[in-house]
Amino acid sequence: MMLFLSPFTLYADEQPNLEDEELPAIDPFQGGSGSISQNSETTGGQSSGGGMLNGLRLIGTMVGENKKLAIFSSPGGMMYTYQELQEIVTGVLITDIFNEYIEVQDVDSNMFEVYMNNIIKPSNG
């Protein structure tokens, strides 16, 4: 039998104040139930949830003096790093990496901005 000690005592006739309770932490990299719903905005026939990047999500960028990296996560939890002018998936090339997003080019030479909140939208230039 396990005994758990509590810093306070709650009697049977008392009701706990649920507004004062701590909420559980939400892992932003965890998929499935309990996660925040993802924006599946469609852009030019491509869905930000899968399509263009085959399920990869941009989770970070590193912009240094001599090197820029884009960090992606796969649905299975693997992490991948890519540099500028490197192909992410067949036909999708990283053209530029910024602090908040990256620019990619597809096989039809269309330019897109990929953001860390899982939104892919056409690039303005």
Image (cartoon, rainbow, N blue to C red):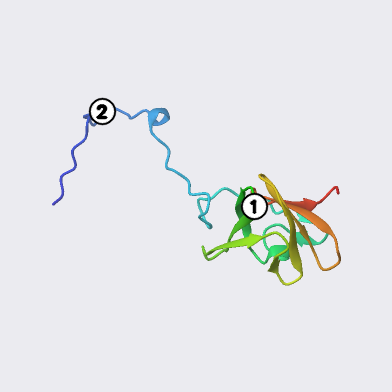
Task: Check disc 1 and give the amino acid type.
Answer: Asn
- Ranked by sequence position, the earlier of labels 1 and 2 is 2
Q: Check the image and name the residue furthest to the front.
A: 66
**Circle 2: element type:** loop
Residue visible at 73% across and 64% down in the picture:
52
State the residue at coordinates (63%, 51%): 38
Location of residue 113 in the rendering, given as x and y in whole percent from the top left corner: 76, 52
Query: Viewer-proximal residue, 97 or 104?
Result: 97
Residue at the (16%, 49%) spot, across then down: 2
**For mark 2, does the 10 Å Cα neighbourhood hold few (<14), some (14 to 19), or many (20 or more) residues?**
few
Residue type highlighted by circle 2:
Asp
Tell me the number on the disc at residue 13: 2
Q: Residue at horizontal 66%, vertical 60%? A: 83
The picture places residue 47, in percent across and down from the top left corner, at: 73, 59
Q: Which residue is mark 1?
A: 66
Q: Which of these two is toward me, 120 or 70? A: 70
